[in-house]
Image (tube, rainbow, N blue to C red):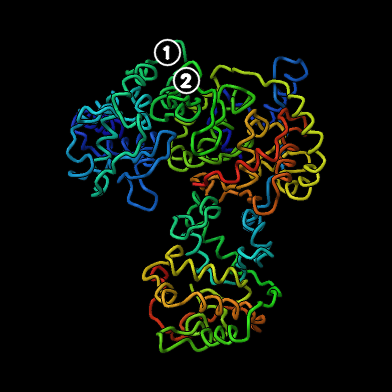
Amino acid sequence: MRTHRWFALGLLVLAQAGYGQDTSIVARGEYLARASDCIACHSNPGDKPFGGGRPMSTPFGTLYSPNISPDRATGIGAWTADEFYNMMRTGRSRSGMLLYPAMPFAAYTKMTRPDIDAIFAYLKTVPPVHRPNTAQDLRFPYNNRTLLLGWRTLYFTEGEYKPDPSKSSDWNRGAYLVEGPGHCAMCHTAINALGGSSASAAYQGGLIPMQYWYAPSLTSNHEAGLGDWSIADISDLLQAGVSARGAVYGPMAEVVHNSLQYLSDADIRAMAVYLKALPATGASSAPTQAEVQDKLRLFPLGKKIYAAQCATCHGMQGEGKGSDFPPLAGNQSIQMTSSVNPIRMVLNGGYPPGTIRNPRPYGMPPFAQGLSDEEVAAVVTYIRTAWNNRGTAVTDADVNALRSAPLD
Amino acid sequence: MVLEHRTIGDFAVGRYVAGVVLCLALLIGTGPVYAQARSTVTAPDSIATRVMACTTCHGLRGEGSNDDYFPRLAGKPARYLYNQLVAFRDGQRKYAPMNYLLEYLPDAYLQEMAEYFAEQQTPFPTLPKPDVSPAVMALGQKLTLEGDDRRHIPSCVACHGASLTGVSPDIPGLLGLRTKYISAQLGASRYGARVSAKPNCMQKITVLLSDADIAAAAAYLSSLPSPPNPAPATEGSLKLALTCQSSEAR
């Protein structure tokens, strides 16, 4: 009986799918909106969600996210499902205007029509916010949207994700989530001078413009390449924000906080399967003569500071304490080519996000106020090169340049 | 910990199995494999360990530090500390390093942190004598103890308690803080950079203060000795000069 009732309910859901009114479609839309992390950009911190207006600094000027709440006058309350789908699929707004690629339409184009419809159904149910959109503030020539035609030719391919029948269903689901709603390539593929991400460099990492955090390569085992991580550790990192291999920090903490912590175990596992299977690329180059000299100079001071300030939590051998205090020995995040993240962690510290699975995270104190540029350079050089870590030395100037990096 | 390995199906290799596999891979030397140190020891499950990110600046038990701008937290009313943590997290109180640290922490956890520091009892520091003239100190004393009726400025003790150790649940104590910290907070309140929950009572007073008033009150407050009883006055024990406590605390 019970089974039949559920089956009947399933049919009912299917029957109503076209109207976008069914609560289960709204719930699925909420889930997918979280997977797509709409809220991060379309809400101004401290204001009502989805009202837009969040300023986003780019190398080309400041963009303001639009209002996507269902307010008829200033949001998307007057839009139809077809118009919303066309925008997500083609990167053209309702009026036909080309969208700036700060909107990850190059990823959202891979989503299925039912998924996009569900997101639209959900957005129709959130409280409307009456807030007229802020005009974009880009410098010449970037304020000319017709230039986007060139960008689109280079970096945008319209079309839904095509499953690879030679791969497992987990792999395909993971690929869909990572490449589509998750829009991971927005940060984890280097952004070039034209503000584009080249497919040939997919997931090979890059400095996030204006934020001064380095989004590590997801392919290289020298960075955040996940080839030698267990599926459990990858899943822990994505869903709980901490794992036995390391914790999320910087912009990734926001992604876990707003988006990934809400995904189901099955979806997180699928993403982990896909990420682990990304082909390994890149090898680290040998340290230069200058880097070797810097290491010899800074290592002893770094060792002293480490013993006094760091070893209580991270252990004398950099072994860490479970997933509470991440291990530093063998930690790719510390020894990768770019030293931006380890320097910033020492300067700014950080708490991983409080998540459903880890609501009371342990935290790392900031040391910007207590250590000089040379001392930070020394301790970062130490952790990058001790315990067989294969990183290179960093300089006082590297540290000094990051003291003024934005914290928001 | 068991849960971590619950759903991993075909890839079900526990941490130790993974370790063995790694070691084997290293022994047979197949390609670049990164041995990672693993600790089976986890951190103590205590709030004292969880707030170690705070104590580098605020002192091991929230007693403050030698830096002018890192205030004492120990013994301040829990609701006051919680309100500040939330205001930092949500950006109503602006100080980038604090805004950044707290950005993704949930209310319940901030409450736990606030309670921890509120419970700490540590000796008050000996602060340097403020280098100001007797006239400035006299103005500071007058504002602190009597206020200025003519300018409608209530005294500090009118709301922060006769012994200036604050009032539960949400009015902070003013002792054991350095001159520069107190004047920076009064200035930030006056200019709207430090905002408390509506009706933002403190700002109604700070907008009436001149630079000289702020310098005098800050110098006098930082010169006061440790109180015999550091506990905040109990809720309702003081008839406040203004009836505009943080409404959020009600």
Q: In which quarter of the image is residue A243?
A: top right
How many other residues sit within 10 Å of disc 1, few (<14), some (14-19) or many (≥20)?
few
Q: Which of A199 and A30 is in front in this view?
A: A199
Say which label, 1 or 2, has the lower sequence index: 1
Asked if badge 1 and badge 2 are on a common chain, one would say yes
Residue A194 point in image, percent of width and height: 43, 24
At 66% from the left edge and 84% from the top edge, which residue is drawn? Answer: B228
At 70% from the left edge and 21% from the top edge, which residue is drawn? Answer: B33
Chain ID, mark 1: A
Q: Is residue B218 above or below residue A265?
A: below
Q: Is residue A284 visible?
A: yes
Residue B18 point in image, percent of width and height: 67, 26
Q: Nearer the viewer, residue B158 or B85?
A: B158
* Amino acid type shown at disc 1: Asp
Q: Quadrant of residue B10?
A: top right
Q: Nearer the viewer, residue A217 or A198?
A: A198
At 70% from the left edge and 74% from the top edge, which residue is drawn? Answer: B128
Q: Which of A61 and A284 is in front in this view?
A: A61
In this view, the residue farthest toward the top is: A166
Which quadrant is the N terminus of chain A positioned in?
top left
Please tell me the numbered disc located at residue A164.
1
- Mark-to-mark CA distance, 1 and 2: 9 Å
Q: Can residue A1 be seen in this view?
A: no
* Amino acid type shown at disc 2: Trp
CB atoms of marks 1 and 2 within 8 Å = yes
Q: Mark 2 = which residue?
A: A171
Q: Is residue B146 left or right of residue A370?
A: left
Name the secondary structure under disc 1: loop
How many other residues sit within 10 Å of disc 2, few (<14), some (14-19) or many (≥20)?
many
Q: In this view, does A329 lie above or below B119?
A: above
